[in-house]
Amino acid sequence: EPEVTQTPSHQVTQMGQEVILRCVPISNHLYFYWYRQILGQKVEFLVSFYNNEISEKSEIFDDQFSVERPDGSNFTLKIRSTKLEDSAMYFCASSLGMESPLHFGNGTRLTVT
Amino acid sequence: AQSVSQHNHHVILSEAASLELGCNYSYGGTVNLFWYVQYPGQHLQLLLKYFSGDPLVKGIKGFEAEFIKSKFSFNLRKPSVQWSDTAEYFCAVNSGYSTLTFGKGTMLLVSP
């Protein structure tokens, strides 16, 4: 069964540094998402992406965040200047259609020190 | 705005016990409902979903969930749990073209 893959599995970075989290969605999926889960809290929506542009974003997704689909397979999340509170598990997901179930990757654990 | 409540944060059961995890949502319109499971060290996986039709939905690994519209609930059930069901379970909802909203999750520990 095809999977969403995320790299790296764990990223440690210093406060103020830029970080890029990478995702390869399922190849025939059209909708892409980033969610995050701060330890002990619920999974939170960050952003959705369709047709090479952001279709929806949450309040969390401020100017420090950006997403890109640089080629036909990768979907990246960039945090320009990381803060301690950005430490979380970041999940990429993709879906075939707007109301289709999301398929999630294994997540990238980001630790900001 | 839609929201999801999972009332049990931790549940501990012995093997062969029956399971019911509560999920309530708040939204007045048509909703799609999901249960995702996250096994230790693994990604979130879809367990089952409800879009329309029969409110009793059967998913993988013997799980089922019942949509009760009048109670705004979508409780997850399994008649007899196994040690391998130890995982975190997330209820989620979306409506129309909105993105998924997750509950806080319920950690299930099944002792052998």
Image: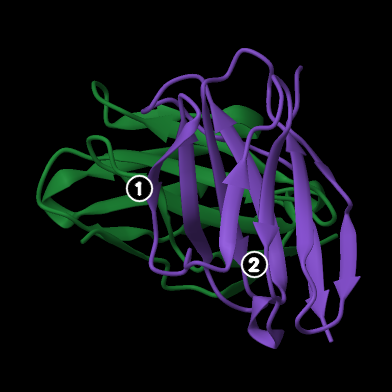
Chain colours: A purple, B green
Q: Amino acid at mark 1?
A: Val
User: Which callout, 2 or 1, points to the residue nearer the camera?
Assistant: 1
* Residue B96 percent location from the top left of the image: 22, 35
Q: Nearer the viewer, residue A46 or A17?
A: A17
Q: CA distance from mark 2 to mark 1?
A: 19 Å
Q: If you read the primary sequence from the N terminus, does the residue marked by circle 2 or circle 1 appear first?
A: 1
| Above-or-below relation of B9 to B87 | below
Write down the residue under mark 2: B107
* Residue B93 percent location from the top left of the image: 35, 47
Write down the residue under mark 1: B93
* Both marks 2 and 1 on one chain: yes
Circle 1 SS class: strand
Residue A61 visible in rendering = yes
Residue A106 visible in rendering = no
Q: Nearer the viewer, residue B36 or B108?
A: B36
* Residue B2 percent location from the top left of the image: 24, 58
* Residue B104 percent location from the top left of the image: 50, 69
* Residue A52 as seen in the image, left or right of residue A79: left
| Above-or-below relation of B20 to A5 | below
Q: Amino acid at mark 2?
A: Met
Circle 2 SS class: strand
